[in-house]
Image (cartoon, rainbow, N blue to C red):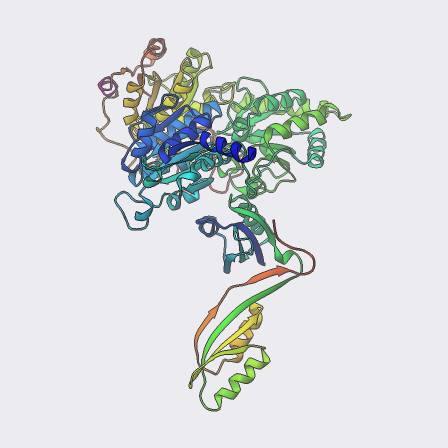
């Protein structure tokens, strides 16, 4: 009798909610306080549920691609899961580019898409697309919700999957009738999850770690090669401690910038296609490479068959499928970067072995010599005496003005590479760019996502006049939510990176990489959205005008800097069939 | 090398498309694929035959394991195993041909499962090689239709694949 009574009480305490309210409640229970989205028919029940609550703020973007990039910037800069809400059909397909961007860079994201009602699925209903199918190759996982009762557990699973192991985007597709406000179901947010088919890696294999440490300590020409996994896996502090303790050189991938302090003398700069001479050359001559949270991307390795011929490779990654995918690892270690690096450090501390001091001193002497000869700073890689503004100088000036402490997002092209080379990131999560997919249009919405998370920080979007026009509509979102960011446009009046390739590999045939006289007046455009526009054309104005622009803190400033349109990004690895150390150092100099 | 990979996965809609999608997305071969629910209705068992060197196969198994719906998998070709495929074939058989066909069926331990006055429908189970050989043996008779199930497999001895 007593048991029966208890059960009765329990049951009456369970709240009855509609599917739409359940979704919002589940997001709240999951700790979500921010959604980026855009409404439409299939998502209207959900939007109504959002209207009737306070704790989750919804940011209305101007294009669903912008929503995904903003959520992505938010996620990259905070480590939290970015949340996106879009409607079915065109809303969902517009989100695809942003989902793919997040997927390639392993960014935790949950994308909720409305879907046509269950009984219409498969009938080519108005605004129907198979979102689970469309997104399948670019998500970590996806769900099609069949019943409202599934919503709480699905939300919990989605966030768990998105944020653990190798993070990535997860899609939850919800048919409209599942969120019907007229039908209510008992709501319970599960405390625990049981997923027999998903167990993300935790700590690494101790035997492998001991082997790795022995190999590392016996190295004579070591390089630590750290990627985005160190940033995403919050391993930067441990990595820095490890490198300092061993006095080993560190290079970061484009995605890993900030995983090791950029201004530290042990930092060789970025490696890969536009990596520094010293980073690429040191990699090529290394005898032991410690790869941490990096995936031997083709933009890093150049020709795999010629990759680092004398090196033994230790590879730490949370994703076993990343290990030995393109370059075979001698000591593979599957585990979280944090757990593995912590155990490595302990093993090193308690080891009787020490790095070979004199070998390491010699190695540093060699590296310093490379740096002296062709480094980005010691031997300027660009003209410094012309009349035109050099893009590299713009980045260096902004680095100085922001004291190296800004969040910098970027688009894709030459400007991205100049930013990566010349803005030295001392902290992780400060450099926010689409490395894997290389998505033009990423920079501005990502900057807005970062600014929401860090309202008191300087947020700079380094862009090109090509890229910025791919998501320019988000200038309006910046106005609506008062998100003051700096847009630094390195205006070379061309799709510069494309043009560089055409000049280097197609005898200068500039097929569709220039716009003739069609560029908009970005100052007026910014002003039309209620922002401030600044145009900088003369070299002597650069510092003063930049300083003025950066002094403005309460509004978005579009800084349109006309730079030398003929400039190329160097170093640039020789392709195809070059090794890591084969580089163009300027238009005429080759290693 | 030819490999038989046996996969236990959640019996969820869309799970199969993730497996098939993975193969086309990453450019892996699928020679054959069979799938059906198991005695535990929440699980399906999928058997796929693929071809690749050790490195390719390692990538295939790692990426299959990465799919959230995949619970467990095993490369059956790593140990001794039993491999079976089912063949159904319709053969034209008139007059004296009827006895000849029957003899071949007996030799291959097949069964005639349907008959008309001019046709036999034959069922044979075995390895892919055996089925190939049977079809070859039928050579001079007119084959009207062939259906093969794709390979199913199971490990020999005590080894089992379950959750
Ligand atoms: C969406 C998209 N389309 C095409 C490309 C190919 N692409 C790479 S860089 C580039 C040129 C970018 O021009 P701009 O933004 O002006 O930058 P710049 O190289 O001139 O600094 C193009 C077209 C891309 N990365 N993304
Ligand atoms: Mg440009």
Query: Which residue is more in the foreground, B38 or A549?
Result: B38
Percent coordinates x, y for residue A25 in the rendering: 41, 29
Q: Residue furthest bottom?
A: B96
Give the magenta-colored segment's residue range: A524-529
Query: How many numbered dots are placed on residues in this image?
Result: 0
Q: Main secondary structure of the magenta part?
A: helix
Quarter of image, res A506? top left
Q: Residue B40 in magenta?
A: no
Q: Residue furthest front?
A: A1
Is A439 on the left or on the right of A62, as rendered? right
Residue occupying image coordinates x 31% and y 20%: A478
Percent coordinates x, y for residue B39 in the rendering: 56, 56
Residue occupying image coordinates x 22% and y 29%: A518
Query: Which residue is more in the foreground, A409 or A320?
Result: A320
Query: Which residue is more in the foreground, A416 or A81?
Result: A81
Quarter of image, res A73? top left
Percent coordinates x, y for residue A286 in the rendering: 63, 32
Quadrant including the N terminus of chain A: top right
* Ligand 1 sits in quadrant: top left
Q: Relative to A200, is B32 above or below?
A: below
Percent coordinates x, y for residue B158 in the rendering: 69, 57
Q: Is residue A354 visible?
A: yes
Q: Is residue A500 visible?
A: no
Is A52 on the left or on the right of A293, as rendered? left
Quarter of image, res A526? top left
């Amino acid at each position: 009798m007593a048991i029966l009574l208890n059960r009765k009480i329990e049951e009456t305490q369970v709240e009855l909610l509609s599917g739409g309210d359940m979704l919002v409640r589940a997001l709240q229970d999951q700790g979500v306080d921010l959604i980026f989205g855009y409404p439409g028919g299939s998502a209207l029940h959900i939007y109504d549920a959002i209207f009737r609550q306070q704790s989750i703020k919804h940011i209305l973007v101007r294009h669903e691609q912008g929503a995904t990039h903003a959520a992505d910037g938010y996620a990259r800069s905070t480590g939290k899961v970015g949340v996106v809400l879009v409607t079915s059909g065109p809303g969902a397909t517009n989100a695809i580019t942003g989902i793919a961007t997040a997927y390639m860079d392993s960014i935790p994201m949950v994308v909720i898409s409305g879907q046509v009602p269950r009984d219409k699925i498969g009938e080519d209903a108005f605004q129907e697309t198979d979102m689970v199918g469309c997104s399948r190759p670019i998500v970590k996982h996806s769900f099609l919700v069949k019943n409202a009762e599934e919503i709480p557990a699905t939300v919990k699973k989605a966030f768990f999957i998105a944020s653990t192991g190798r993070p990535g985007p997860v899609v939850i597709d919800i048919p409209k009738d599942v969120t019907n406000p007229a039908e209510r179901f008992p709501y319970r947010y599960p405390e625990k999850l049981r997923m027999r088919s998903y167990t993300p890696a935790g700590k690494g294999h101790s035997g492998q770690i001991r082997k790795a440490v022995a190999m590392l300590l016996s190295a004579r020409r070591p390089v630590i090669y750290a990627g985005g996994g160190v940033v995403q896996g919050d391993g930067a502090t441990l990595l820095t401690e490890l490198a300092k303790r061993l006095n080993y050189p560190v290079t970061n991938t484009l995605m890993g910038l900030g995983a090791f302090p950029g201004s530290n003398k042990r930092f060789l700069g970025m490696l890969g296609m536009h990596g520094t001479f010293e980073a690429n050359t040191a990699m090529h001559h290394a005898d032991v490479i410690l790869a941490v949270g990096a995936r031997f991307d083709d933009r890093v390795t150049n020709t795999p068959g010629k990759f680092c011929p004398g090196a033994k490779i230790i590879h730490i990654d949370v994703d076993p499928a990343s290990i030995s995918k393109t370059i075979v690892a001698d000591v593979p270690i599957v585990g979280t970067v944090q757990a593995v690096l912590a155990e490595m450090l302990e093993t090193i501390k308690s080891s009787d072995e020490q790095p070979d001091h004199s070998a390491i001193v010699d190695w540093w002497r060699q590296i310093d010599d490379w740096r002296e000869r062709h480094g980005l700073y010691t031997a300027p890689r660009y003209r410094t005496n012309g009349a035109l503004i050099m893009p590299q100088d713009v980045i260096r000036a902004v680095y100085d003005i922001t004291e190296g402490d800004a969040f910098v997002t970027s688009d894709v092209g030459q400007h991205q590479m100049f930013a990566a080379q010349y803005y030295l990131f001392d902290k992780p999560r400060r450099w926010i760019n689409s490395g894997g997919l290389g998505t033009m249009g990423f920079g501005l919405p990502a900057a807005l996502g970062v600014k929401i998370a860090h309202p008191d920080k300087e947020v700079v979007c380094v862009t090109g006049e090509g890229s910025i026009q791919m998501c320019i509509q988000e200038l309006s979102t910046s106005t609506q939510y008062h998100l003051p960011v700096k847009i630094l446009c390195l205006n070379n009046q061309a799709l510069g990176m494309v043009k560089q390739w055409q000049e280097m590999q197609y005898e200068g045939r500039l097929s569709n990489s220039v716009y003739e006289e069609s560029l908009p007046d970005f100052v007026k455009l910014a002003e039309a959205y209620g922002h401030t526009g600044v145009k900088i054309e003369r070299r002597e104005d650069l510092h003063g005008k930049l300083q003025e622009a950066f002094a403005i803190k309460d509004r978005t400033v579009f800084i349109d800097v006309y730079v030398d349109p003929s400039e190329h990004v160097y170093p640039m690895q020789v392709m195809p069939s070059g090794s890591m150390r084969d580089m163009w150092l300027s238009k005429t100099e080759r290693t | 090398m030819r490999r038989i990979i046996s996969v236990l996965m959640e019996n969820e809609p869309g799970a199969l498309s993730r497996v098939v999608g993975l193969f086309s997305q990453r450019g892996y071969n699928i020679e054959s694929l069979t799938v059906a629910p198991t005695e535990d209705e929440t699980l399906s068992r999928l058997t796929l035959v693929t071809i690749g060197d050790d490195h390719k196969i390692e990538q295939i198994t790692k990426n299959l394991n990465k799919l959230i719906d995949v619970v467990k998998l095993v490369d059956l070709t790593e140990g001794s195993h039993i491999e079976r495929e089912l063949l159904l074939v319709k053969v034209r058989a008139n007059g004296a041909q009827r006895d000849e066909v029957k003899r071949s069926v007996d030799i291959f331990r097949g069964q005639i499962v349907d008959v008309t006055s001019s046709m036999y429908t034959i069922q044979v189970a075995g390895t892919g090689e055996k089925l190939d050989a049977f079809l070859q043996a039928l050579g001079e008779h007119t084959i009207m239709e062939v259906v093969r199930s794709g390979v199913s497999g199971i490990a020999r001895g005590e080894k089992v694949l379950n959750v």
